[in-house]
């Protein structure tokens, strides 16, 4: 499963960014229209941390080593732009997780990995959809 391992190693730095980017946004978001999002965004950070651990476990389980780098973070004091960046970066991370699926194969452990990726994608997409709705209301 070298291709799966490589795709997982590509996804992990994006997942690690998700943890930190949501944490930055939840602690730094300002403006009346966005204050209600701070706690929910922090909940997302906690989900992202759990999923990062699952990716590390899978990489190790396949005999690889997890990368220790993190995809580039951004800080923006403008809450709308911060949410826009969350949306953009999460779409990139979702695409990286999706890229794992075609490489998984057809054996039992492959099916389990595919379902894990689908679960992560589903959760991330729900978060993206929420942020898109919040962004529309704020404008």
Image (cartoon, grey):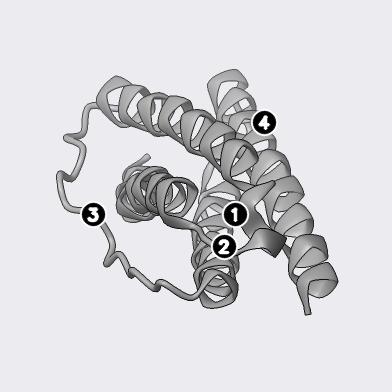
Q: Dot 3: what SS?
A: loop
Q: x, y percentage for residue 17?
A: 35, 53
Q: Dot 2: what SS?
A: helix
Residue at image x 58%, y 66%?
Answer: 83
Q: CA distance from mark 2 to mark 3?
A: 16 Å
Nearer to us of marks 4 and 2 is: 2
Please state, as top left, top right, bottom left or bottom right, where the N terminus lies in the image.
Answer: top left
Q: CA distance from mark 4 to mark 2?
A: 15 Å
Identify the mark at residue 9; answer none if there is no mark. Answer: none
Is 81 left, or right, of 63 in this rendering? right
Identify the mark at residue 115; answer none if there is no mark. Answer: 4
- The first of marks 4 and 2 along the sequence is 2
Nearer to us of marks 3 and 4 is: 3
The residue carrying pointer 4 sits among few (fewer than 14), some (14 to 19) or many (20 or more) residues within 10 Å by Cα, namely few
Quarter of image, res 131: bottom right
Contact check, label 1 and label 2, Cβ < 8 Å: yes
Front residue of this view, candidates 33 and 19: 33
Rendered view: 81 above or below 26 = below
Q: Kindly identify which residue carries mark 1.
A: 98
- The first of marks 3 and 4 along the sequence is 3
Q: Tally the numbered discs.
A: 4
The residue carrying pointer 3 sits among few (fewer than 14), some (14 to 19) or many (20 or more) residues within 10 Å by Cα, namely some
Q: Dot 1: what SS?
A: helix
Q: CA distance from mark 1 to mark 4?
A: 11 Å
């Amino acid at each position: 499963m070298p291709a799966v391992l490589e795709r997982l190693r590509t996804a992990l730095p994006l997942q690690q960014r998700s943890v930190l980017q949501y944490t930055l946004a939840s602690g730094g978001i300002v403006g009346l229209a966005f204050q209600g999002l701070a706690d929910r965004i922090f909940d997302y950070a906690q989900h992202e941390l759990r999923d990062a651990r699952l990716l590390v476990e899978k990489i190790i389980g396949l005999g690889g080593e997890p990368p220790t780098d993190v995809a580039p973070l951004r800080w923006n004091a403008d809450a709308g732009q911060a949410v826009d960046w969350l949306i953009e970066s999460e779409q990139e991370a979702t695409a990286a997780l999706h890229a794992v699926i075609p490489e998984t194969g057809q054996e039992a452990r492959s099916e389990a990995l595919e379902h894990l990726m689908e679960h992560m994608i589903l959760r991330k997409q729900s978060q993206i959809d929420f942020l898109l709705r919040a962004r529309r209301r704020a404008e």
